Amino acid sequence: MSTTDHPRSIPNRRSWRRGLALFAAAGLIVAACGDDDDDDASATESATAAETATASETATAEATTAPTTEAPASATEATAESSAESSAEATASSTAEGTAAAPTGDPIKVMTVTTLNAAGPTYENIANTANAYADYINARGGIAGHPLEVTVCDEQFDPAVAATCARQAVEEGMVSIVGSFTFFAESIVPVIAESDITWFGACCPITPSELTDPHSFNIGNQPMYAVGAVKKAVDDGCENINAVIIDGAQIFIPPMENAMANLGKTFGDVIILPPTAQDYSAEVAQATTDADCVISIISETPFITWNTAWAQSGTDAQQYGPQGNLNEISAKGNEEATNGNIIVGMYPDISTDPWTEYRTALDEAGLDTTELDYNSLGGMGTWAAYVGFTKIAEGIDGDITAASFYDAASKTSSLDLGGMVPVLDFTQEWSDGLEGYNRLFNRSVVYSQLENGKVVPLTTEFEDVGDLALPPS
C-alpha cells in the first residue's frame, strides 16, 4: 500500500486536526496506555500511543470526581512475587511508610485528566496510579511537608468536558495537570497555560499544544518507540521488513520510513490494518509474505485477534510491537507463536529497579495488577510524571504555586527519575528535530521480550533514536 499521502510532520493545526479525527474515529492512539475498554468490541480501540489493558468499568470514575483521599481498591491477586519483593524493598528504604511526619498545611492541588466513562477507550490505570501516588507520598510526609491532593477529571471522551476540566483546574488553583492522557488536550493546554498551569509529564503527547506549548513538559516520547522498533529489527539482522499500522495511527509512518531510509532500508510493504476485523488472516498473510520481520503498530485488543491469525499462519517471521500492546494479554493463547517477539517501549519493564516504589504503591493500594495493565505507558507514565513533579516541587523556595512550578520546571536541566527515563533537560527544546515536536524531550527506547507468554526485560540501557526519526539528509 502506498504511503505517499500520509502526513509527514505536523505543519499546521488544520492538518493535525484531520489526523486527530482519524485517530478518534478509529479509537486509536493510546492502546499502550493500558486501559482499553472493549465492551462493544467496536471501533474505538485506543491505539499505540499510550497503553493497553483490558479494563472493566470499575468504580474508579465515581471515586475520582473529587479530590483524592483514598486510592480505589480492588482485589489483590497481583503478582505475588513483585508484591513481596516491593514490600521488602520499601521496608528497607528511607521512604518506608511511617518514617516521616504526617504532612500538614495547605495541600498541593494537582489534577490528572483521562477518560473513564465512555463508549470507547478508557484508562482506569492512569486514574488508579494517580490516586495510589497521592496515598503513597502522603503516607511518607507529602511533598515538602504538604499533603498532595489529586483530582482526577474524567473528560468522558468529549472535548467540551475536557475544556471543563481545564476551567476547573484554573478555578480551583491547581499547581499542575500531571500524568494525563486525553485525545482532547487541545481543549485543555491553551486554557491552563493562561494561568501558568503546566501540562506535566504526559506519556503520549498527540496534539500541537502538547508538543509545542512552553507550558507542556512531556516525559514520554511517542512516536519514538516505532522508530526504535525499526532500529532493533535492523540491528537483529532483518533483511526484509514489512510494517503493519492500525488504521488511525498513520502518523507513525513518516518517522518509521525515515528510520528505514537512514539505515539503508525500505519497507517491502506497509499494511493498514482495520481496527475491528474479526479475522486478520488475509492481513497476516500479506504482512509475512517475503518478510523475515514484521513491525506491528497495533493496539492491544486488535492485537489479540492479530496474534491468533499470526499463530494460525505458521509463520517464522519475527514480530516487533509496542509496550502495553504486544503484551501478556494479547499473547494469551498464542504463547508459542509469539515467543521471542520484541516489545519496544519508553519505560523499562515494571519488574526492574526503577519501579520498586511503584510496585509497592500498587500493592499498598490493593490494586489488582492482573485486571489492568500497569506495565504500560499509561501506568508507568503516570507514576513517572508524579515522581518528576515531586522532585521539581520540592526544590522550590517559597510557595509551590502554578507560577513557581512553571518557572522551576522551565529551569530544570537535569531531571533524574532514577532510571524510569533518561535524565531530562527541560531547558533544551528539540529545535532541530521533527517539525512540530519541539517539546519531545525524551527520544529514547528500551526493549523487552515475550518468553512463553510472559514479558521479560531485554535491555535497560536507553537508546536515543531521535536522529533516526529525521528525514535523511
Image: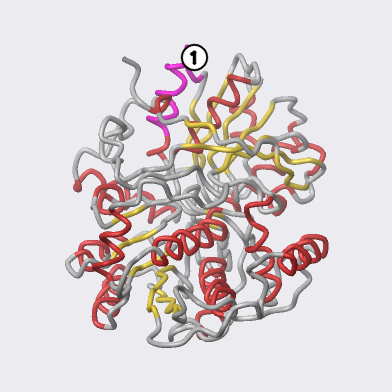
Quickly name the residue at label 1: 265
The majority secondary structure of the magenta stretch comes to helix
Residue at 50% across, 62% down: 387
Q: At numbered mark 1, what does the secondary structure look like: helix, strand or loop?
A: loop
Q: Please provide percent x and percent y for residue 339.
A: 78, 37
Q: Which of 28 and 52 is in front in this view?
A: 52
What type is the residue that disc 1 sits on? Lys
Question: Which of 25 and 198 lies nearest the eye of the viewer?
Answer: 198
Task: Please state if 13 lies on the left or on the right of 130 as rendered.
Answer: left
Q: Position of residue 220 (x, y in %)?
A: 45, 49
Percent x, y of residue 264: 47, 11
Question: On the rendered image, what quadrant is the N terminus found in?
Answer: top left
Looking at the picture, the colour scheme in use is secondary structure
For the magenta stretch, what is the residue range? 253-267
Judged from this view, the residue extending furthest toward the top is 264
Task: Report if residue 12 lies within the magenta region.
Answer: no
Q: Residue at x 43, y 86 (%)?
A: 66
Residue at the spot 43% in from the left edge and 50% down from the top edge? 415
